[in-house]
Image (spheres, rainbow, N blue to C red):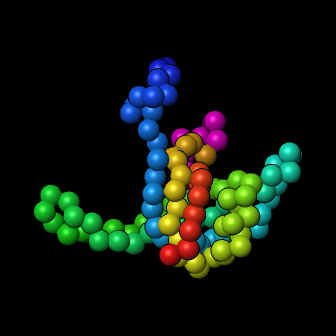
Amino acid sequence: MIPNPDPESSINRNQVIISGTITDLASPRYTPAGLMIAEFKLSHCSNQQEAGIQRRIEFEFEAIAIAETAEKIIRIGSGSNVEITGFIAKKNRLSNQLVLHVRDTRII
């Protein structure tokens, strides 16, 4: 069992800031409460320094946005370059697959 960390503790930190291109933007769907959900992939490509060596990093991962943030993603659209702020969580309670939950985004 994973302990419930103190909300003020740095062990409770789960924040991601990443840039990339929105791809595979699905048609919006809605929760039973009427909140919009936008599911998409973010394609990331960058150069990173690791142990004094320059590395080319390329990957794609799933992301989800809800409510006003979902509306913003839908307006921005597939193919747009964005910076996303969010957190990582399991896709659902029965899955071990991780997904980026978007809190905010801006076009870059």
Q: Position of residue 88 (x, y in %)?
A: 51, 46
Q: Nearer the viewer, residue 92 or 70?
A: 70
**Residue 107 shows in the view:** yes
Is residue 1 highlighted in magenta?
Answer: no
Q: Nearer the viewer, residue 46 or 75?
A: 75
Q: Is residue 59 left or right of residue 57?
A: right
Q: Position of residue 13 (x, y in %)?
A: 44, 38
Residue furthest front in the image: 8
Q: Is residue 96 left or right of residue 8?
A: right
**Residue 37 shows in the view:** no
Which residue is drawn at the image coordinates 56% and 74% (left, top)?
Answer: 107
**Relative to 30, does residue 28 appear above or below in the rendering?**
below
Quarter of the image for residue 53 reads bottom left
Q: Position of residue 81 (x, y in %)?
A: 52, 76
Residue bounds of the magenta highlight: 92-100
Which residue is drawn at the image coordinates 49% and 28% (left, top)?
Answer: 7
* Magenta portion: prevailing SS class: loop
